[in-house]
Structure formats: structure tokens, C-alpha cells
Image: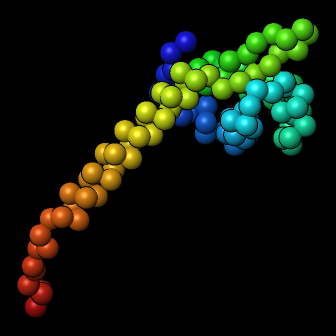
Amino acid sequence: METNDEAVWGTLGDRTRRSIVLLLADGPSPVGKLADALPVSRPAVSQHLKVLKDAGLVDEEAEGTRRIYRLNEVGMLALRDQLDTFWNRTLGTFRDIAQQPEERHEPDR
């Protein structure tokens, strides 16, 4: 599944979804374990996981009667690439501005 840049950033705009991503960075987890670590209900965590899955950031796998969730490697690499691109452009622009010769202005009288 490909990620959609806007969907990914919109998805991560929610604090609970960011928390879920951070929890899943520690390793795969079932919904119940995620819900235990968050101040929201299990059904709410399931809804957030669906949004993360639709954005291409999370995958699920059936393990018996449980669903185990993990970060989607391709989605996370795409997110990392977007962040790298943003910071490379931003820092490059800052470097260019910092290296410009200082313009001398006469004070207004």
C-alpha cells in the first residue's frame, strides 16, 4: 500500500495516533495492550488504528482471535524520506541565507 503525503500528515496530527505510532515503534502489539497504555477506550484505539492503516503507516496480522498491529516499514520509510527532504531544504535555505554577505544599509535620517 502506498502512502498519501497529505493523509499521513493529517493522520499524525492527532495526539492519540502519534502515541500509538510511538508505542508500535517498540514492537508489535494487540489492541488491548495499546489501549492499556492510552487514556482512550479500546474501541477508540481500534478506530485510530484503522486510520493509521488506511494512511499506510500500520499493518495488522491475525494471530488466533487477536489482531496484532505493527508499523508498516514502507510507510515509515516514506515518512522518513519526507522529513529528510523537508529538513534538507530548510537547512539548505538557512545555509544560503547565512552565507550571503551582510548588506550594509545607511541609517534613515
Q: In which quadrant will I find the N terminus? A: top right
**x%, y% of residue 94?**
28, 58
Question: For residue 45, which quarter of the picture?
Answer: top right
The reply, left or right, for residue 25 in relation to residue 2 is right
**x%, y% of residue 32?**
90, 28
Extreme-bottom residue of the structure: 109
Q: Is residue 50 visible?
A: yes
Judging from the image, the colouring scheme is rainbow
Residue found at x 41% / y 40%: 84
Residue found at x 12% / y 69%: 101
**x%, y% of residue 13?**
61, 39
Q: Is residue 17 visible?
A: no
Residue found at x 81% / y 23%: 46
The reply, left or right, for residue 82 in relation to residue 74 is left
Looking at the image, residue 11 lies above or below residue 100: above
Q: In which quadrant will I find the C terminus? A: bottom left
Query: Looking at the image, how many numbered discs can be counted on the residues?
Result: 0
**x%, y% of residue 49?**
73, 24
Residue found at x 14% / y 73%: 102
Question: For residue 11, which quarter of the picture?
Answer: top right
Residue situated in front as seen by the camera: 72 or 105: 72
